[in-house]
Every structure is written in structure tokens, then in C-alpha cells.
Amino acid sequence: MRSKVQWASAMALAATAFTALLSAQGSGAEASDMIPSPAKQEPAVEFVSKPVVQPLATDEDAGTDETSESSATDMQPTASSLLQLVSEQSMPGKLGREMRCLAGAIYFEARGETLEGQLAVGRVIVNRAASSRFPDSYCGVVYQRSQFSFVRGRSMPKIRERSEAWRRAVAIAQIAKADSWVSPAKGALFFHAARISPNWRLTRVGRIDNHIFYR
């Protein structure tokens, strides 16, 4: 009797297992979800180091810096001689007080001399105005006591403003102020007429026309 019961139980268990197996095969999606599948193998990532070269910009890409070019051109000398540079200067309609003092000193001190001699005189006044040893303006330098023999008190003699000598003096004053031509007495702070010998203990720069210049 017991063996029959055991046999019946074994048969029932086998039937249950067979039924479960048939149920699992009935749905492909569910069955596949239950079975682990191998992960898809992705190709390994590789890094290749290569130099990155950026091409230089061309004029078409970046355009032309007209401001820089014009500034560089302005810095170049445009005259081949001091005479040409003088001829290129325009005569202002009205001179300011400072420029009148500078041009007046050139006119009275050196109007009968060469353009180089006039420029040297003008540059002395400009150099003095820039030096801490003298007044800081052209008029202050020119009217400083006992410096220029043409000065009477705080005034100059009358200038013939329609003369060619005055126009040249104004042009030289403009050049001296702008330092647009190298002075033949570069760096000079003093000068005197060649006819006198004050025995100054200064460094002599040289003689130009009728004046001797010193630092």
C-alpha cells in the first residue's frame, strides 16, 4: 500500500514538472528574460594624440590694421632735408603765446643764420623747458632774467610778421617742438655768440654758425 502511494506521488510530481516546463516555453520574451545572455562587447576606446596646428590668419581673414600702419608711417621721416621739412610746415592763422615765444627767440637770435643754426637755438629753448633746472614753459625760459639779450623787461621787439624770416622761424619752432629733425647741437642747454668767450665750465657740444653750444 505504501509503495503504491509513493508511486502515485512520484507520478504527480513528474506531471507538475512537465506542466511547468511547457508553460515556460510558451512566451519567448519572458523565457529569454529569464535566461542571462552574454553582454555585448563594445570596441575599446583609443586616444590618438596628434598636434593641432592652427593656420595663421591671412589679410583676407583678419583685415588690415590701417591705424597701426598709418601710425608706423607717421613715425618715419618724410623729408629728405631740413629745407624740405621747413617748406612742409603750414603757417598757423594765429600763434599761441608759447609758440610765439619760441619762434620769437629763434627769429631774434638766429634769423640771419642757416636753418640748422636756427633749429639748434630753438632746441635749446625746448630742452630748457623740459629740464628741471629752468622754467617749464617756453615763455618762462625766454623771459628768464638775464638770459636773452633781445628781451627788454618782459617783452620782445616788434616782429616783421609778413617777412620770410618770420615764416621760417615759425616753421623751425614747429619742428623744434615736435623734435622731427635731429638738432646739430643735440642735448644743448646753453649757447653764446662766437665773438665772446665767457669761459663756461660746461661740456661743449660744438659751434654752429655764429653760436657755440654747451650741455
Image (spheres, rainbow, N blue to C red):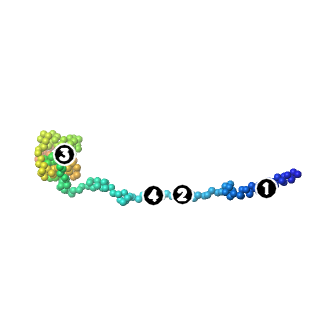
Q: Earlier in the sequence, mark 4 or mark 2?
A: 2
Disc nearer the start of the sequence (1/4): 1
Count of numbered circles on the image: 4
> Which of the image's four quarters has the C terminus?
top left
Residue at (19%, 48%) from the top-left corner?
123
What residue sits right under mark 1 in the picture? 15
The residue at which mark 2 appears reads as 46
Q: Which numbered disc flags the more N-terminal residue, 2 or 1? A: 1
Residue 12 at what x, y percent from top left? 80, 54
Q: Are marks 3 and 1 in contact (CB under 8 Å)?
A: no
Label 2's element? loop
* Pointers 2 and 1 in contact (C-beta within 8 Å): no
Identify which amino acid the numbered label 3 is placed on: Gly
Q: Disc 4 designates what residue?
A: 52
State the separation of the CA atoms marked 3 and 4: 60 Å
Taking 140 as reference, is 210 above or below it?
below
Q: Is residue 182 left or right of residue 29?
A: left
What residue do we see at 18% from left, 41% from top?
A: 140
The residue type indicated by label 4 comes to Val
Residue 65 rendering spot, x and y as whole percentages: 33, 55
Question: Residue 96: which disc?
Answer: 3
